[in-house]
Structure formats: structure tokens, C-alpha cells
Image: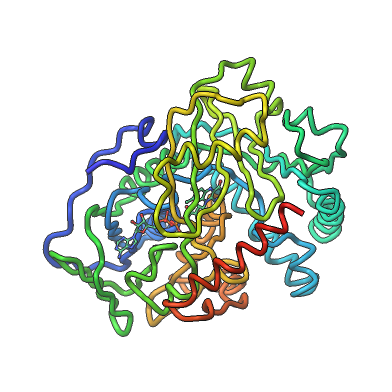
Amino acid sequence: MSHAPSYYAATANPFPDQPQLVGDLSVDVVVVGGGFTGLSAALYAAEAGFSVVLLESQRIGWGASGRSGGQMIPGMRWGAVDLAARFGDDHTRQLVGLANLAGDMVKGRIARHSIACDLRHGHFHAAAKPAHLEHMKRELDCLERLLGYKGARVIEAGAVQDHVASPMYHGGFVDDNGGHLHPLNYALGLAQAAREAGVRIFERSAVTAMDHAGPVIATTAQGTVTARHGVLACDAFMGELDPKLGAMTMPVANYNVATAPLGEDRACALIPSGAAVSDSKFVLNYYRINADNRLIFGGGEKYSPRPPADIEGFVRPYLEQVFPQLKGVPIDYGWGGMVGVTLNRLPHFGRIGNSFFAHGWSGHGVLLTTLAGQLIAEAMQGTAERFDLFANLPGRPFPGGTLLRHPLYVAGMLYYALRDRL
Ligand SMILES: Cc1cc2nc3c(=O)[nH]c(=O)nc-3n(C[C@H](O)[C@H](O)[C@H](O)COP(=O)(O)OP(=O)(O)OC[C@H]3O[C@@H](n4cnc5c(N)ncnc54)[C@H](O)[C@@H]3O)c2cc1C
């Protein structure tokens, strides 16, 4: 079984097919989902001495993790200013301080396991409106005041061209702590590290039922795994296994393209710093130059579950709006994936019986998921303070139930997308 077609699938590092689960196993921990969250939880749990089985319905990295923009964006979807206004300074200091550990954790994993995933440094958040730049200045002040944050600065409109050769922006937030990577190869590297730590991975092994009371029992078509602890790491696909948890997130389709290689000079002229770039539009554009000098570009959201017939044609207008100089540029790959979005855009952590879950990354999952895996493994060992910092964040299901949540959400999104154009 191959990965869903994409630039990443075409350039994936070798990783052997893992067997299907056949028969009944008994272990300490059963993890459901082979994306960053599940892989990280499995790896940290195995390192803590637990025996671990990971069950993935398709292939490792098949979900959002193996298809994402690869942008390592520090922090959470809510900035420190908004968190402090809602939760106060002390809680924000703890939350953002913890979230900010994720970048070093990912870089640490890459170094420790020698994961070849084209890691590059730097993130630039481009201001699409003058008011967004003012907000970025307040954000930097808040980060410096609460956390003594280092490595970030705000630049004015006149300096934008040093970071990105686009006419669209009014300044931006430069953060040396961010970066970008080849997400499928990071997932495969984590999986390899997990195997070496003793995790048994099964692919093409969809969990069809899960019992969380007493011992956790995960059932697949041809077997069961009984465990002391379970981990639900299915993000946008959670609803298929647990409709109640699934109602806490909305799967939103997002599309990426990879241009043909542009050559070093042309690529460098587009993003001179080599950083990952995302902009502050509500329906954001996000892009980066990768290891072979392609532009990997994500833009536009489609609220119907059906993918566009022509992904390249769907994304191209956004790309050419950001970079008019790339009009007609050849596009070699186009692909899509499902982003798990919560109603308030904060991730949703918690427990059901003896199982833990973490999902709803709302487009900020490349870094936070690796952290979540560590926090889940800590909680299994009885130290749940850091897990509970996230688990205590407010969250509620999408209104309208599973039938109406989608049309209501679409109406809301179209309103905000319209505001982008004002
Ligand atoms: C197109 C796109 C671009 C993105 N760009 C960025 C970005 O640039 N930066 C950023 O920070 N975030 C980005 N994100 C979000 C980020 O990729 C996700 O938040 C993150 O990868 C989620 O990881 P996960 O492990 O929780 O979920 P996933 O990677 O989706 O993994 C869940 C896995 O669970 C498996 N599964 C589901 N149900 C079952 C079952 N019943 N039994 C067994 N297995 C099951 C699925 O097959 C899947 O492999 C993007 C997402 C998409 C789709």
C-alpha cells in the first residue's frame, strides 16, 4: 500500500511496510494513529519502559502529518496577547512557556535519531493588513514581558522584501525559533526511532471499536490489543472511531502544491532568509522553499468534503497573488489533507477512562504534537501537571451536531474569508 500521492510521498525515505495486526496482544500501552501525535506518544512511552503497540489504519504519516506544509510555527494558534486577555498572565506564562518547548523537542528528536527531513530554521509571519502589524508588535512586547522571549523581532513594511518578495505585506514577525521540515520524513523518522525503542507498529489495522473502562481494548478486523493505557491520536479522523470526541473538531480540507525546482537564485530571491512564511489572513497562505528549491505553497480552504478536480488550478490563484512574478510557473505536485480544527482553535486534550487523547491542532500541529506525546507519556507515569495545563483549556463541541455542524461552520468561515478581502 503506498502513501497518498504528493511531493512528500515521491521523496519519502525508505521505511518498510509494517504488518497488519492479526491475533490478540496484551501490552502496557496501545496507541491509535500513526501521525506525529501517536508516534511521539509511542516513542516517549517506550523510552519510559512501557511495552507499546501502535495501530495505524493506513500507513505511517498517512494523515495530516505526512501531508502538511511542514511549517514549524512556535506557540499555539492563539498568541500570548489573546491568551493573557482570556486566562491571565500566570496561566499564559505557563502555557506558552510549555508550548515553546516543542520546537527544541522536535529539533532534538531530529538530531538524536539523525532524521533526514531537510530541517531549516526561521519563521516569518507576514502582516496582511497594517492592523495585523500593530497586533504583532503587542504580541512581541507580551512575549518579552511574560517569558523574556528571545530570537524574535517585528519588521516594518520597508523591510519586507528582505524576507519575502511579495507586494502583499505590511511588515511582519520574524521568529528565529521557527523553521520547516519534510513532514512525511519526520514522521517516518519518528516511526523508525519508535521501532528501535521497541514499539510494535501495525499498518492497515484500523481500530473499529475501543473500550476504555478497565483494561483498554482496541479491536481491529483481525485482532485485539488489551492494554493498561490507550492513546487516541486520530485528529481529524477521530469521529469515525469516537463520534463524541469527533464532534469537538471539524475536519477542514487544505491543499498544497510543489512547483518545479526554481533553481537556487530564483528560489532565494523569493524568500531570501530561507524561512517558512505564513501570512495573517484568516484563510491564510503559507509557503517555503524546500531542499530542492521548489516552492511548497498552501493556500485557500475548501469547505465541501469533495476535493477540487484540479488541485493545482485551485491553489495557483493564491500562489500568483502572493508572487505575481511566478505567473504560469510549472507545478509538479498537488495534494490535500484534513486539518482538525476546534471551535475556539485551542487544542483539545483529555482522558476517557484509561485512555488519553490530544487533537484539534487547528493548523498548528507540526510542533505541538511531539510535545503532546511527551505529556501523554508523563501522564501515564502519574505526572499529569503539564498534560493538565492543556487538558484544562476550555473546549466545546461544534453546534448543530454532526448533521448541522458543517453548514453552520461553512457559513462562519465564509464570513471571515470575506473579511480578508476588506
Ligand atoms: C494540508 C495540511 C497542511 C498543514 N500545514 C501545517 C503546517 O505547515 N504547520 C503546522 O503546524 N501544522 C500544519 N498542518 C496541521 C498538522 O499537519 C496536524 O496538526 C498534525 O499533523 C496532526 O498530527 P496527528 O498525529 O494528531 O494527526 P494525523 O497526522 O492526521 O494522524 C492521525 C492518524 O490516525 C489514523 N487513524 C485515524 N483513525 C484511525 C483508526 N480508527 N484506527 C487506526 N488509525 C486511525 C489516520 O490514518 C492518521 O494516520 C497541516 C495539515 C494539513 C492537512
Closer-to-camera residue (210/267): 267
69 relative position to 11: left or right: right
The relative height of residue 20 versus residue 397 in the rendered view (above or below) is: above
Q: Quadrant of residue 42?
A: bottom left
293 relative position to 322: left or right: left
The relative height of residue 231 versus residue 156 in the rendered view (above or below) is: below
Q: Point out the image quarter for the C terminus.
A: bottom right
Q: Quadrant of residue 207?
A: bottom left
Q: Where is residue 351 drawn, in percent x and y?
A: 45, 77
Q: Point out the image quarter for the N terminus.
A: top left
Q: Where is residue 182 drawn, in percent x and y?
A: 48, 37
Q: Where is residue 12 drawn, in percent x and y?
A: 36, 34
The relative height of residue 10 versus residue 208 in the rendered view (above or below) is: above
- Ligand 1: which quarter? bottom left
Residue drawn at point x = 51 percent, y = 21 percent:
261
Q: Where is residue 181 drawn, in percent x and y?
A: 53, 37
